[in-house]
Image: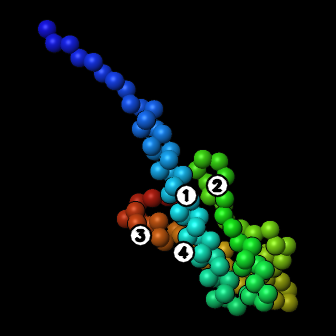
Amino acid sequence: MSSFNFTSHASEVKAAKDAAVTKALEMIGLQAEGYAKENITRVGAVDTGRLRNSITHAAEGDDTEVIGTNVEYAPYIEYGTSKMKERPYLTNTTLQIWRGVQRKSGGHKRI
């Protein structure tokens, strides 16, 4: 009679998957940061460069990458005011990242 030994490699597979997700999120965050900085320039929202230079990204939890700024006037640039038209740079960044994910996944992934 034959005997079989099975060895589980589930923990190694999970660790490799988690590392790949972390790396992918970092790459997406870097790309989004670059898009946002390009978009700020493109929409004409650069005076001193403070807002553009403050854009950064960071991991939040295991499956989320956050991009943004702590500059207090950033929402006024993004959404406008009663005296200034909107100049969306983060909204455009989100759309650019979404299109890239859709293109690379063949249109089958949701974010």
Q: Pointer 2: what residue?
A: 59
Q: Pointer 1: what residue?
A: 25
| Residue 89 x/y as whole percent | 67, 79
Mark toward the start of the polypeptide (3 vs 4): 4
Q: Pointer 4: what residue?
A: 96
Out of 4 and 100, give the one closest to the viewer: 4
Question: Which quadrant does the N terminus fall into?
Answer: top left
* Viewer-side label of 4, 1: 1
The figure's colour scheme reads rainbow
Query: What is the C-alpha distance between the residues marked 3 and 1?
Result: 17 Å
Q: Residues within 10 Å of mark 1 (few under 14, many from 20)?
A: some
Amino acid under disc 4: Gln
CB atoms of marks 1 and 2 within 8 Å: yes
* Viewer-side label of 4, 2: 2
Amino acid under disc 1: Leu
Q: Pointer 3: what residue?
A: 103
* Viewer-side label of 2, 3: 2
Amino acid under disc 3: Arg
